[in-house]
Image (cartoon, helix red, strand yellow):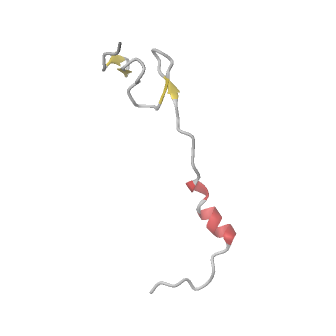
Amino acid sequence: MAVPKERVPKARRDRRRSHLAMQAPTLVPCPRCRHLRPPHTLCVNCGTYNGREVIATA
């Protein structure tokens, strides 16, 4: 079985895990209605994507 030869110090363990922290989602304003949305996705407020209407909204 795989058994570590020696104990991994807390500093090394924590450096290895440094990129695992939670991050806030990236949001950009829609160019048409200025509603915040994730990049490269459909705007749920006005229904447009890439300058054209994809979903008709009320």
Q: Is the residue 4 above or below the residue 32 in the image?
A: below
Question: Residue 41 in the image: x percent, y percent?
Answer: 39, 30
**For residue 12, side relative to residue 20 (left or right):** right
Q: Tell me where residue 20 sits by quadrant.
A: bottom right
The residue at 44%/87% (across/down) is 1
Residue reaching furthest top? Answer: 58
Q: Residue at x 45, y 15 (%)?
A: 32
Residue at the front extreme of this rendering: 58
- The x, y position of residue 6, in whole percent, is 62, 84
Q: Residue at x 59, y 52 (%)?
A: 21
Tell whether 30 sits left or right of 7. left
Can you give x and y, in whole percent of width and height, for residue 5 in the image?
Answer: 58, 86
Q: Is residue 28 above or below residue 33?
A: below
* Residue located 41% across and 31% down the image: 40
What count of labels does the image hold?
Answer: 0
Residue 58 is drawn in which quadrant?
top left
Above or below — where is 54 with respect to 23? above
Q: Is residue 55 left or right of residue 1?
A: left
